[in-house]
Image (cartoon, grey):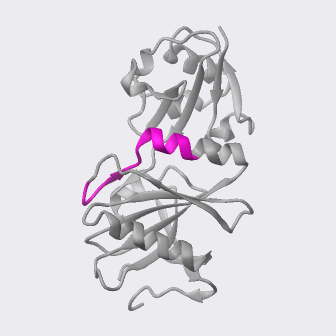
Amino acid sequence: MTRAEMDGDFELDLSTYDALVEHARSDAPFEVCGLLATDDGSRVAVQYEIPNAARSMTYYNMDPKAMLRAFRDMDDREWELLAIYHSHTHTEAFPSKTDVELAFYPDAVYLIVSLQDPGAPVVRAFNIRDGKITERALTVDGEEASVGAR
Amino acid sequence: MAIDVRVPTVLRTHTDGEKKVSADGATLHEAIRDLGRRYPGLAERLLDADGSLHRYVNVYVNDEDVRFLGGAQTPLEDGDEVSILPAVAGG
C-alpha cells in the first residue's frame, strides 16, 4: 500500500461512507465522482453525485453543468465544499499522478474509493496541495476506517 | 458594459475575498483582461499565453459552458453573468 505523510483525521458518518461505496459500485468498471458539502465545517450536509463526463475506467472529469448546479446550490445555502470524491476501479485508494496534477481545490479533502478488491472496498482521505499529498486518517462514525494492511 | 462575474472560493484570494465582481468587455476575453487589470493574477488563472481559456477551467455565460459558445471569444452583453469553476478531474 502506498503511503503519504499523515496529517490529522477526517470524519465521515456511516451513511455517507456507504453512499460513496454504493455510488462507486453503481457504475463500475467506470470511475464515478462527486462532491460533499458541509453546513458546519465538518458534518456532511449533502452528497452531490456528478456524472463523469469522461466515462472512463482510468479518468474522471466532472460534467461541467452538473458541477455548476452543485456549486450554485452550495452558494445559495451558504454551504461549503468539504470533499471531492472519485473511485478507482482497478487501483488502490491513493492519488494517481493525474489526481495530483489536476488537484485545483487545495482546501478540499480528496476521498478515493477503491474497488480494486470488489468485496472489500477501501476509502482513504487526502489533501493535495502544491503537488504534495498528505493523508487524513479516515474515521467512520468515530471508528478508524479499514484501509487494508498498513 | 457591466458583466457580473461569480468568483469561486479558490480564486477569491485574487479578489480580496469578493464572491461577485463586475467586469467590462464585449467578449469574455476582454472581460477577463479587464478583471486582470484590477485583480492581479486572476487573468493568468483563466487564460493561456495565447489568449485561449485554460483547458481545466470551466467558464459559463448565463450558466452555459463557453466551450459550446465561442470559448474566450464568446460575445457578452450588458447584464450577462459569467461563472468560473476550476475543473474537478483526475485519474
Q: Is residue A63 left or right of residue A46?
A: left
User: Where does the image place residue B21, in percent across and percent down from the top left?
Assistant: 70, 26
Q: Which image quadrant: the N terminus of chain B?
A: top right
Tally of numbered tags? 0
Farthest residue in the bottom direction? A149
B20 in the magenta segment? no
Q: Is residue B48 left or right of residue B83?
A: left
A67 in the magenta segment? yes
Residue A95 visible in the picture: no
A99 w.r.t. A74: above or below = below
User: Where does the image place residue B31, in percent across and percent down from the top left?
Assistant: 57, 17
User: Where does the image place residue A25, in percent across and percent down from the top left?
Assistant: 34, 70
User: Where does the image place residue A22, in percent across and percent down from the top left?
Assistant: 41, 71
The residue lying at 35 percent from left, 83 percent from top is A1
Q: Which residues are magenta?
A: A56-70
The residue lying at 28 percent from left, 77 percent from top is A116
Q: Which image quadrant: the C terminus of chain B?
A: bottom left
The residue lying at 53 percent from left, 39 percent from top is B85
Residue A78 visible in the picture: yes
Viewer-nearest residue: B72 or A117: A117
The residue lying at 72 percent from left, 63 percent from top is A41
A123 w.r.t. B4: above or below = below
Viewer-nearest residue: A30 or A99: A30
Viewer-nearest residue: A130 or B75: B75
> In which quarter of the view is residue A127 placed?
bottom right
